[in-house]
Image (cartoon, rainbow, N blue to C red):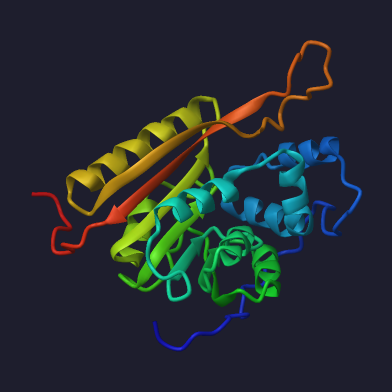
Amino acid sequence: MGESRVDHRFEVLPSPTLHLIMSDSSRTAEEARVAFQSCKSSDPRDRVQFYDSWAQNYEKDHNLMSYRSPHLAVNFLSENFSGSREEAQVLDVACGTGWVAKLMAELGFRHFVGVDGSKGMLELAAETGLYQDLRLALLGTQPLPAQTGVFDVVVIAGALDAGFVPVSVVREMCHAAKPGGFVCMVRGDHTGAPADKYKKDLERELQLMEEEGLWSLVGIKRVDRYMEDPHVNPERDDVQDKPYISGTVYLYQKSIDTAVKSRD
């Protein structure tokens, strides 16, 4: 993997316009819902600014919405990974504040490389002290900045959705895994035409990559309670129970025969 380092030479981005920068220990669920609902722009640069401004409250707001994506990823990986956790090289795609790495470190994983499009998020990830390398990249517009064929685990939790990380990045993640390495993907099954199309395109690509011999399916796990729906207020009179978004965990293992990489 070459010399390990933490790359703090992040791109300087425009100052955020949203006033979410300061961490608030007294955040409420309603404030968390407002933050989620504020992320409306489909422009990647606007989203970067939003996440820069949200970084300090990101984990707190997600916990207030009972967000389970990092835990689902780490638990499913832990159930299926039989190699040396202390030696395993982990690529954390859309790593955010380092939530996944913190959970994996509790289970004995020690070597992490993180990639995210938000400078503010990466600064918090760096503060965990868990990453040997952190890279700023807006996935979909820039290639995944990772070496090919070196990672025992490649993981992405929560970013696979319309307007965020495009389906094309999944193939790049597979290329980053070493032969026999695992690629774990977790996403919320959001509703609406863009989300439905994204899921259809994603699962078509996953199947195509399996048919090409790039990887094999280890397992798929469906969960009813991926997170509370932040766009529905459970305090309303017409809402009987907390509304939840369902989710899906996908786990693939890269083929040992790496020569099989293209369609016949």
Q: Nearer the viewer, residue 239 or 196?
A: 239
Query: What is the residue that sits farthest to the right in this orientation?
Result: 26
Q: Does residue 186 appear left or right of residue 172 in this picture?
A: right
Q: Position of residue 193 (x, y in %)?
A: 49, 25
Residue 129 in which image quadrant: bottom right
Can residue 162 be spotted in the picture? no
Q: Is residue 32 placed above or below 152 in the rendered structure?
A: above
Q: Is residue 50 placed above or below 231 in the rendered structure?
A: below
The quadrant of the picture occupied by the N terminus is bottom left
Residue at figure coordinates x 23%, y 42% from the top left? 208
Can residue 127 be spotted in the picture? yes
Residue at figure coordinates x 78%, y 25% from the top left? 233
**What is the total number of numbered labels drawn onto the structure image?**
0
Q: Does residue 51 appear left or right of residue 132 in this picture?
A: right
Q: Position of residue 183 (x, y in %)?
A: 38, 55
Q: Nearer the viewer, residue 233 or 79?
A: 79
Q: Does residue 122 appear left or right of residue 174 in this picture?
A: right
Q: Is residue 167 placed above or below 152 in the rendered structure?
A: above
Query: What is the residue that sits farthest to the bottom in this orientation?
Result: 3
